[in-house]
Amino acid sequence: MHITAEPRDNYTILHLRGEFDTFYCPHLHKEVEALITAGTNRLVLNLRLVKFINSTALGAIIKASKSLAAAGGKLTIARPSRFCADIIQKVGLDRVVPMFDSDEAAGAALLEGAPASESPTGELAEEEEGALMFSPTDTSRVEHFIPEENRGGGTANPVHGHKFGSSWRGIGKMNDLSTEGLRFTWAGGKTGLTPFEIAQFLAIGTDLTVKFRLPLLQKGHCEAEVTVTEIAERENSVKIGTSFRSIDDETAAAVEQYAKDMAYLKTELKKATDS
């Protein structure tokens, strides 16, 4: 990762480029400490060109924010890449370090305390990193509940555009992931199903094959088999809870690491918000 400092009138923008992982955390720390020593305590982190960030790097941003606050300053984030914005919002880091959709807005917030943008980047609308693909192990459930004209020829991967096969796939939004299972929300896509009908289609005890991404890890789509254990109807969607039924060792290890990363970040965020 490369870090370039761009001085402005009353603050400095740090442009980060590349992959922000554990190895580069000391580099950010040294850069921030050097700027504080030089008398600069208001910084903007521009993450537009950061395509990957891990939990330790997020922790380093929290540490930088606390160091600047101790020096009477503040840290903001500008123009985060889709990956970074999605992760930062998922873990709640934006409650500690606000995000903005431009360098100027982030700089103004340092000087005036302006509110953060609710949508740091328009690219978030695609929600690629939170996408979860699923299909019932018993394909007859698709034939029974979804009209043939609404099944399509297989759902395209929202990240790469290709299809995972000719069988039907639904795309939900993953809400939570642990070593025991995962939760996701589904609004029915183009099936035409109401929340009540979705609850029947994905009833408790239904086995699903799922494909999902782990936001903090550079792993492609993970695959597992799960069983529906909870289901709750909402006005326009259904929230589904599942437990893992079959998961390979590599994916299980990745999920375990993700759970540890999230626990670490929650602890760091609690320290930051309680202080």
Image: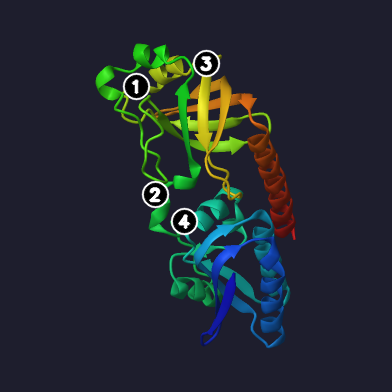
Q: CA distance from mark 2 to mark 4?
A: 9 Å
Q: Nearer the viewer, mark 1 or mark 4?
A: 4
Amino acid type indicated by mark 1: Leu
Residue 108 image point, x, y percent: 49, 75
In this view, the residue in front, 94 or 216, is: 216
Q: Residues within 10 Å of mark 3 (few under 14, many from 20)?
A: some
Amino acid, disc 2: Ala
The residue where tag 3 is placed is: 206
Q: Name the residue beneath numbered marker 2.
A: 125
| Image quadrant in which you'd find residue 191 | top left
Q: Amino acid at mark 3?
A: Thr
Q: Which residue is mark 1?
A: 193
Residue 1 picture location, percent across and down = 59, 69
Left or right, 218 with respect to 270, comes to left
Disc 2 element: helix
Q: Earlier in the sequence, mark 2 or mark 4?
A: 4
155 w.r.t. 8: above or below = above
Q: CA distance from mark 3 to mark 2?
A: 30 Å
